[in-house]
Amino acid sequence: MLGLPPLLSRRSLPVVDRSPVPTVGQRPSRAIPATLRLEARGGQSWVRVERLEGEKVLDTILEPGQSRELALGSGLKIRSGRPDLLYVAVGTSRPQPLGGVSDLDWYEFRP
């Protein structure tokens, strides 16, 4: 009986990458973590960002034209003193105002 060399035993078989192979001219796709982009437009905007569990991520005043980009992770919630001046976008989406001037509640963003 022939024995298998150690390199071919079950325990040492190499792991095969089964991800799809890109065709000619196609770039391989990679998972890109979602981001939350904040931008102040038209005036100062106080903003507080927390993880859904309550951990503070950001507490600042954004000046007009100033922006921040945060990793969305498992989700974030935002509250702003001027939600009408704070524009928010998830990933590559178009920025939208967080809310109206009197919408002072928390807003949740999930992946």
Image (spheres, helix red, strand yellow):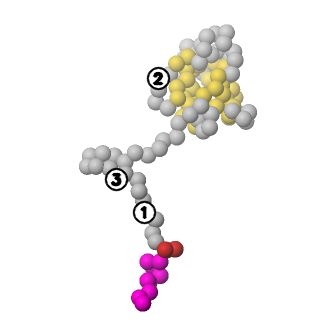
Q: Which residue is mark 1?
A: 16
Q: CA distance from mark 3 to mark 2?
A: 32 Å
Q: CA distance from mark 2 to mark 1?
A: 39 Å
- The answer to whether 9 is drawn above or below residue 105 in the figure is below
Residue at image location 59% in from the left, 31% down from the top? 110
Q: Amino acid at mark 2?
A: Arg
Magenta range is: 1-9
Where the C terminus falls, by quadrant?
top right
Where the N terminus falls, by quadrant?
bottom left
Q: Which residue is mark 2?
A: 94
Q: Which mark is residue 93?
A: none
The earlier-in-sequence mark between 3 and 2 is 3
Residue at image location 68% in from the left, 21% down from the top? 106
From the viewer's perspective, is the residue at label 2 or at label 1 nearer? 1
- The answer to whether 14 is drawn above or below residue 4 in the figure is above
| Secondary element at image label 1 | loop
Q: Nearer the viewer, residue 62 or 37?
A: 37
* C-beta proximity under 8 Å, tags 3 and 2: no
- Residue 21: x and y in percent read 34, 53
* C-beta proximity under 8 Å, tags 2 and 1: no
* Residue 85 appears in the rendering: yes
Inspect the magenta stretch and tell me whether residue 4 lies in it. yes
Give the residue at the far right of this rendering: 54
| Secondary element at image label 3 | loop
Q: Amino acid at mark 3?
A: Val
The earlier-in-sequence mark between 2 and 1 is 1
Q: Amino acid at mark 1?
A: Val
Q: Which residue is mark 3?
A: 21
